[in-house]
Each structure stands twice: as structure tokens, then as C-alpha cells.
Image: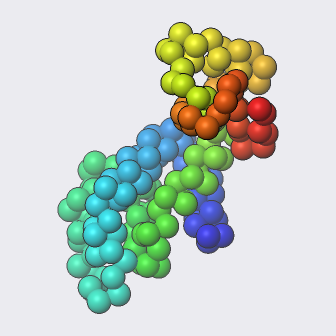
Amino acid sequence: MLTAKIYGASLHSLAKEQGEAEKILSELRYISSLFKEYPYYVKILDSPRIGREELTEILNEDFSGKINRYTLNFLKLLREKHMVRYIDECFKEYERLYNNDNNISVVTVTTAETLSEESAERLVKRLEEKTGGRVILKHRTDKSCIGGIIIETEDIKMD
């Protein structure tokens, strides 16, 4: 959803300006996973049947003092717009922008068998040499992969 991307980008811009980008990234990662684990919580927060003040109070009770005020206000804004269900899309856009700013590449590697820790470390080191930045490796196993390795980034897919 385009609006979620815009919201994620706006929060990222504010976080950078305030020097809180890494902290807010961590908080969004936590909140996004929490909301996936408890989808009914999201439904409650997005509900138009429950009063605005009551929902704001729920967010304050659950998050005040535990997360950055910008992150909390962002949640309140999403709640106000009945967009809490889009938190994951907001987070993904925020994370993409954060990674771009910090020269971090997320690389998905698909192999027929699980990579050993040593092989994964060697691969990360090689990719970091090639990209000149930090690499976060995500590994998938696919038995239909006959051999070799499939490497995917946001822009490139190599087999």
C-alpha cells in the first residue's frame, strides 16, 4: 500500500533528523512481530467501534515508557487513521530506507541443503567485499534446487 510506504518514509525522515533511526528501527521490528503474533490486538486498535480516547489509552498503557515517543506517536497516528494493520508495510519501507542510508544489503540465499555456519560466514564475507558494505544474510532451503545457490537482493537475482 502506497500510503503505508509514505508513512514509513516519513517516520524514517523524522528518526534520522532526531538521531533515533536505529532505535526506532529496533522498536518497529519488535512491534511488527508482536502484532503478527497477536492479530486480534491489531483488530481492536483498528476498530471504529471503540472510542478514540479508549484506544489511545490502550496504546499508552501498553507502550508508554517502553518505546520512543516518536514510535508511540506513530502508532497513535496509524490508529487514528485505522491503519494499524499496515504496520508491517510501514516497517519494511522504514527498514529499506535505513539499510540504504547505512550501506546494508539484505541478501536472500536459497540452497538445496542448509548452509553450514562456516559457509554462511564465508559467503557473507565475500558479499561484503563485493558490495563494500554490510550484508545481512537470510537463508532459505529449497529441495527443488538441484545444486548451486540462488542469491537475491532487492535489485539482483543470480543463479
Quadrant (top left, top right, bottom left, bottom right) of the C terminus: top right
Q: Position of residue 72 (x, y in %)?
A: 38, 59
Can the viewer see residue 102?
no
- In the shown orientation, is residue 43 left or right of residue 101? left
Quarter holding residue 130: top right
The extreme bottom residue here reads 49
Q: Residue at x 58, y 46 (%)?
A: 95
Q: Nearer the viewer, residue 131 or 121?
A: 121
Q: Residue at x 23, y 79 (%)?
A: 54
- In the shown orientation, is residue 121 left or right of residue 42? right
Q: Position of residue 85 (x, y in %)?
A: 44, 69
Q: Position of residue 142 (x, y in %)?
A: 57, 36
Quarter holding residue 108: top right
In this rendering, is residue 17 above or below 142? below
Q: Residue at x 61, y 70 (%)?
A: 1
Q: Nearer the viewer, residue 65 or 106?
A: 106
The extreme left residue here reads 61
Q: How is the image coloured?
A: rainbow
Q: How many marks?
A: 0
Can the viewer see residue 157?
yes
Q: Residue at x 29, y 89 (%)?
A: 49
In this rendering, is residue 90 above or below 134? below
In this rendering, is residue 79 above or below 88? below
